[in-house]
Amino acid sequence: MRTICLVVVLLAVSACSGRRPPAEALPASPLARAAIAEWEAWGRIVIIGWPDEPPADSAATPERFARLLDYWGTIPGGGRVATRLLGLRSGVTAMADRITAEMPGDDGTDSPRPNAPRPPEDISLYDYPAWSAAFISTVARRAGVPESDLPSSSRHARYIDAVLRRAITDPEHAAFSPHAPEEQAPVPGDLLCADRAYVPLDHWTRRLAETGRPRPMHCDVVVRTRPGVIEAIGGNVRGTVALRQFPSDATGRVLPAPPGRPSFVLLLVAREEGGRQ
């Protein structure tokens, strides 16, 4: 009975509520701008739809690795993960240096080349644990979003639960209001969330019956919309920070994901961003 009441309340709340974009098109939303800044720092990687292959540029450069550690440093308990990743990188680097040093020289002899340069490893080596929620937490803090509005967490489901709870208990002041993605078009500053579970939710309100339980999810920050396309930036997308381009319908609402891909289940509308007051 309690769950049914919460659903009714939230439904009522919902009812009320390329490459780098040119400078003149940068969004007013602080959350969207913070996401764009991170995307630029990672090399402006663009992913169209749901490709099977990774992006061409996925090197674990020192700059990217440092930013990844910074994301983990944003969330509670993330320091332990950062320390483990530093140890992993140290081991990978030592092994790669040893293999490179033992390779034959360029002169065709078997003489080792101890000072030979080596390319950086792939950033996907550091995908575990997944860091997409830590990325969202980081851009939220840099955008000035309070913890009470979107708590820092290593899991999307945890901060989603907190956002839904805030929408229930304090709808007048909640920073985000929940909607089904098919209900309205997103604007910069909104969060577009997908359910990666084997059996995904058929509607976001189903989450209210399992609050606090683990559920693999993923959210991206909407940064730009144009006819037929929604552009959103997320972390740990094929191991990188990438701008993803999703197809939209004539009204600007995101189209369903293709079969076998994580389904869009929730749009967290930023109430005071992107032109919505």
Image (cartoon, rainbow, N blue to C red):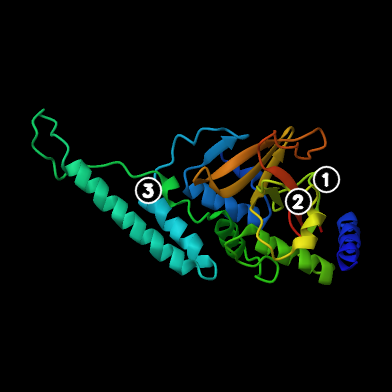
**Residue marked by disc 1:** 184
**Residue marked by disc 3:** 61
Look at label 1 and name its amino acid: Gln
Question: Which mark, by number, is residue 196?
Answer: none
Look at label 3 and name its amino acid: Thr
Where is residue 107, by image quadrant? top left
Above/below status of 218 relative to 154: above
Q: Please tell me how crowded label 1 is: few (under 14), some (14-19), or many (20+) other residues with Cα within 10 Å.
A: some
Look at label 2 and name its amino acid: Leu
**Residue marked by disc 2:** 267
Answer with mark 1 or mark 3, whichever residue precedes in sequence. Answer: 3
Estimate the x, y position of residue 69 in percent, counting from the top left. Answer: 44, 60
Q: Please tell me how crowded label 3 is: few (under 14), some (14-19), or many (20+) other residues with Cα within 10 Å.
A: some
Where is residue 82, by image quadrant? bottom left
Answer with mark 3 or mark 2, whichever residue precedes in sequence. Answer: 3
Where is residue 205, by image quadrant? bottom right
Label 1: element kind: loop
Instruction: Report the residue at 28% width, 51% height from top.
Output: 93
Q: Name the one closer to the observer, 41 or 178.
A: 178
